[in-house]
Image (cartoon, rainbow, N blue to C red):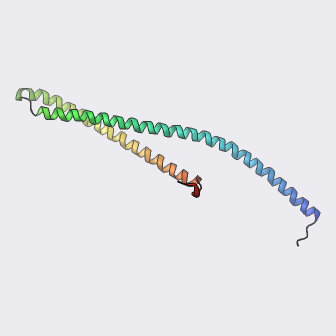
Amino acid sequence: MIKLTHLEMYNEQKQWNSEFRVWLEDIKDWQAQYQNVLNDLKQVQKALENHGKAMEEHKKLIQLYQEALKIHEKDIVEHEQVSVEEEYISHDKLVSRHLEYSKKHAAQKDVHEQTKKHHQEITAELARLKESIIDPRLRT
């Protein structure tokens, strides 16, 4: 059996109590940080909800654009059936409209690629966060 003096035990007890105070201060700081993290998570959740709404709005705009293009396609088909006299006037209008759709399509493509990139960044960051903080036994 190890022999300890009363003084050695008292000094060790004093050291432990000193460590307890430090540990309790650490926990107090951690709890404040934890509250800040919870507040940040609320902001992250709101941003994710906004991202979901933005994706839905993007989807609706694409669907509206598709409908407009169906009408434009129908106009092209109908244009093939116009008389020679009408063709020059209506063809210029048709080409002008088509060029507008071409510009709109390029803009839609840019928006889609930006949305896609943003979505990929979000999902990758969330996967990294999940990997780093969720106990592997609790992952679904």
Residue at 66% x, 44% y is 34
The extreme bottom residue here reads 1
Q: Position of residue 41 (x, y in %)?
A: 58, 41
Q: Position of residue 44 (x, y in %)?
A: 54, 40
Query: Which of the 4 image quarters holds residue 118?
Result: top left
Query: Which of the 4 image quarters holds residue 77?
Result: top left
Q: How many marks?
A: 0
Name the quadrant of the N terminus: bottom right
Q: Is residue 31 left or right of residue 139?
A: right
Q: Nearer the viewer, residue 137 or 122?
A: 137
Q: Is residue 99 left or right of residue 89?
A: right
Query: Which of the 4 image quarters holds residue 70?
Result: top left
Residue at 69% x, 47% y is 30
Q: Position of residue 104 (x, y in %)?
A: 29, 35
Q: Position of residue 94 (x, y in %)?
A: 17, 31
Q: Is residue 29 left or right of residue 10?
A: left
The extreme left residue here reads 84
Quick check: 21 above or below 57?
A: below
Q: Nearer the viewer, residue 62 or 85?
A: 62
Q: Is residue 31 left or right of residue 138?
A: right
